[in-house]
């Protein structure tokens, strides 16, 4: 179920910060123009992640 991970330190290393930024960029909905381009075959981002339900395990 949910894994208990330690809290994120306020002073992050640069590598951890880069990984968090990449995951934040990936966690967004599909652009509307892409739905039009694919003729609405792909309707949503199947890899969306909720911050409370699914943890990153960094």
Image (tube, grey):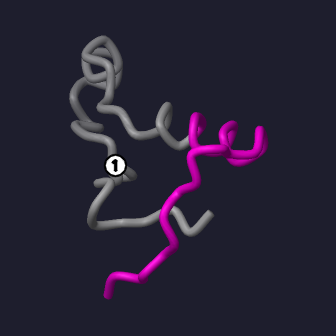
Dot 1 falls on a residue whose secondary structure is loop
Residue drawn at 27 percent across, 23 percent down: 35
Residue drawn at 59 percent across, 37 percent down: 22
On screen, residue 54 above or below 27? below
On screen, residue 8 above or below 36? below
Q: Is residue 32 left or right of residue 24?
A: left
The one nearer the camera, 31 or 34, is 31
Q: Is residue 14 left or right of residue 40?
A: right
> Where is residue 21, by image quadrant?
top right
Quarter placement of the C terminus: bottom right
The one nearer the camera, 13 or 33, is 13
Q: Which residues are magenta?
A: 1-22
Give the labeled residue for mark 1.
Answer: 48
Estimate the x, y position of residue 32 in percent, counting from the top left: 25, 16
The one nearer the camera, 29 or 58, is 58
Estimate the x, y position of residue 15 in percent, counting from the top left: 78, 44
Whether the magenta-drawn stretch holds residue 58 is answered as no
Residue drawn at 25 percent across, 40 percent down: 44
Residue drawn at 29 percent across, 54 percent down: 50
> Where is residue 30, by image quadrant?
top left
The one nearer the camera, 3 or 54, is 3
Estimate the x, y position of residue 4 in percent, counting from the top left: 42, 81
> Where is residue 39, by image quadrant?
top left
What is the crowding at mark 1: few (fewer than 14 residues within 10 Å), some, or many (at least 20)? some
Whether the magenta-drawn stretch holds residue 2 is answered as yes
Q: Is residue 38 left or right of residue 22?
A: left
Q: Residue furthest front?
A: 10
Estimate the x, y position of residue 9 in percent, counting from the top left: 58, 54
Tally the numbered discs. Answer: 1
Quarter placement of the N terminus: bottom left
């Amino acid at each position: 179920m949910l894994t208990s991970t330690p809290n994120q330190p306020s002073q992050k290393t640069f590598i951890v910060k880069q990984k968090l930024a990449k995951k934040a960029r990936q966690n967004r909905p599909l652009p509307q123009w892409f739905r039009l381009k694919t003729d609405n075959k792909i309707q949503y981002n199947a890899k969306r992640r909720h911050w409370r339900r699914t943890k990153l395990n960094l």
